[in-house]
Amino acid sequence: MEKILKVHSVNDYARYIGAEELHPLISVIHYDELEHWVKNL
């Protein structure tokens, strides 16, 4: 069975992949700058 990620806000997703959180409603994620992130969602 596949894994399902329930995301209620952009910060939920940013926290999940380890991105920097600057604003609770807006996120710009630079995947090339992340050291480690979940590649298979």
Image (tube, rainbow, N blue to C red):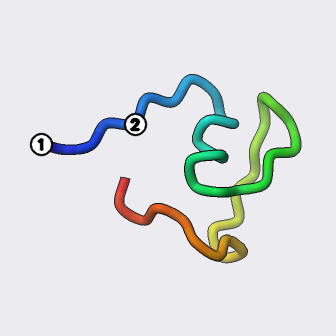
* Spot occupied by residue 23 in the image (x, y as percentages of width and height): 86, 36
Packing grade of label 2 (10 A; few <14, some 14-19, many >=20) is few
Q: Residue at x 58, y 55 (%)?
A: 17
From the viewer's perspective, is 20 left or right of 38? right
Q: Secondary structure at mark 1?
A: loop
Residue 25's tag is none
For badge 2, the amino acid type reads Leu
Residue in the image at 67% along x and 71% along y? 34
Quick one: 11 or 27, which is closer to the camera?
Answer: 11
Give the distance between the C-alpha atoms of the residues marked 2 and 1, in whole angstroms.
13 Å
Quarter residue 24 falls in: top right
| Displayed quadrant of residue 39 | bottom left
The residue pinned by badge 1 equals: 1
- Against 13, is 36 above or below? below
Q: Where is residue 8 drawn, in percent x and y?
A: 56, 23
Total numbered circles: 2
Contact (CB < 8 A) between labels 2 and 1? no
Left or right of residue 12, residue 3 in this image:
left
Q: Is residue 34 above or below residue 24?
A: below
Q: Residue at x 58, y 71 (%)?
A: 36
From this viewpoint, which residue is outermost toward the left?
1
Tell me the amino acid under the disc marked 1: Met
Q: Which label number is shown at residue 5?
A: 2
Reply above or below: 32 against 37: below
Give left or right: position of 15 versus 4: right
**Residue 31 placement (x, y as % from top left):** 63, 68
Quarter of the N terminus within the rendering: top left
Q: Position of residue 41 (x, y in %)?
A: 37, 52
> Relative to 3, does residue 31 appear above or below in the rendering?
below
Mark 1: few, some, or many residues within 10 Å (few <14, many ≥20)?
A: few
* Left or right of residue 35, residue 24 in this image: right
